[in-house]
Image (cartoon, rainbow, N blue to C red):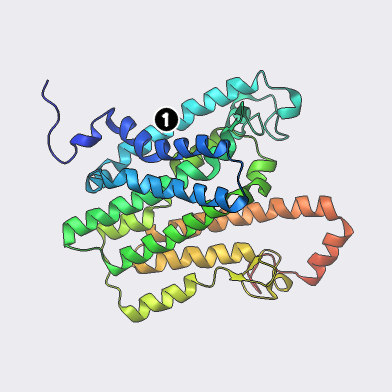
Amino acid sequence: MAPPQGPRAPLEFGGPLGAAALLLLLPATMFHLLLAARSGPARLFQALVLTALLVGLGVSAGLPLGALPEMLLPLAFVATLTAFIFSLFLYMKAQVAPVSALAPGGNSGNPIYDFFLGRELNPRICFFDFKYFCELRPGLIGWVLINLALLVKEAELRGSPSLAMWLVNGFQLLYVGDALWHEEAVLTTMDITHDGFGFMLAFGDIAWVPFTYSLQAQFLLRHPQPLGLPMASAICLINGLETISTATGRKLLVSGWWGMVRHPNYLGDLIMALAWSLPCGVSHLLPYFYLLYFTALLVHREARDERQCLQKYGLAWQEYCRRVPYRIMPYVY
């Protein structure tokens, strides 16, 4: 049989499965194995983690990225199937895990419910922690690669990427880079400390994040939007409201907002999500799906945070809630 010809030939190895493994998993896996043996200072660790993103981009440089947008649907299917098979492995592994390793919420006795939420809290083999690895790297790196492929495709179709496409790619690349640079912060999140690792998180990490979070770039490829410099500058200012560094090195929306809302970090996330959607205009709802989805997600997460804080801090938390009545949005919620 003659080898495949044409611009999609390099993607034919393994079909969509091979392309998905190459683009989403291989760079992150190699660097996870490297970082597992780290012994240097924290800054070196952060630099190496961020390099995982750069290596992913480097691997993609030799591929015809313009062909990738045509394969998003089969790639999403393969990623979902991979997440399902991986979740089966995690569920079977949890059957022999010690009781101390099980998650509090994923052991109801209902196999479907436990498969979905995850029985084991932090499944690992030797030093390899599956949840910690999957929490950021495959999804975020895959998200950036898909965005880049969409930018390349637009350049092929129209001669150069639009300003709106550049903005979306730039905003989201900064977000991913910041997340990877501060990767160890994920160790304090509820996903790591409380939730089991089952299909819910595996599907989110492997399939949902890269293919859903790139909706703005997907929309712009098919529905180009005129965007002038004044509007682009205004959108950049909105995106810049997400965080402001304080003297202690912590991140707040603005100084003092912890006294106005109990979760200003969530408000910052929503403002940032709005800035990602605005370059797509207001003629379609699809680019705003991420904003709507993330609003529902953060409202649900905020309710869980409230319950845990009340249990942990008791009367002190009740007094804080009395003084700061708004949860996420001042004078709204």
Determine whether 264 is above or below 76 in the image.
below
Identify whether 119 is placed above or below 270: above
Quadrant the C terminus occupies: bottom right
Q: Nearer the viewer, residue 70 or 223?
A: 70
Q: Nearer the viewer, residue 28 or 189?
A: 28
Give percent across and percent down for residue 320: 81, 66
Find residue 4 and report its horizontal and vertical position in percent: 14, 30
- Residue in the picture at 36% in, 66% down: 167
Give the farthest residue toward the bottom: 230
- The answer, for residue 209, to whether it is visible in the render is no
Say if 194 sits above or below 98 in the image.
below
Residue identified by numbered label 1 = 81
Q: Is residue 4 above or below residue 258?
A: above
Would you identify the image quadrant in which residue 313 lies? bottom right
| Position of residue 34 measured from the top left corner of the image (x, y, whole percent) | 51, 37
Quarter of the image that includes the N terminus: top left
Q: Residue furthest right?
A: 315
Give the x, y percent position of residue 213.
Answer: 43, 52
Residue at 43 percent of width and 30 percent of height: 82
Q: Tell me the SS state at disc 1.
A: helix
Q: Amino acid at mark 1?
A: Leu
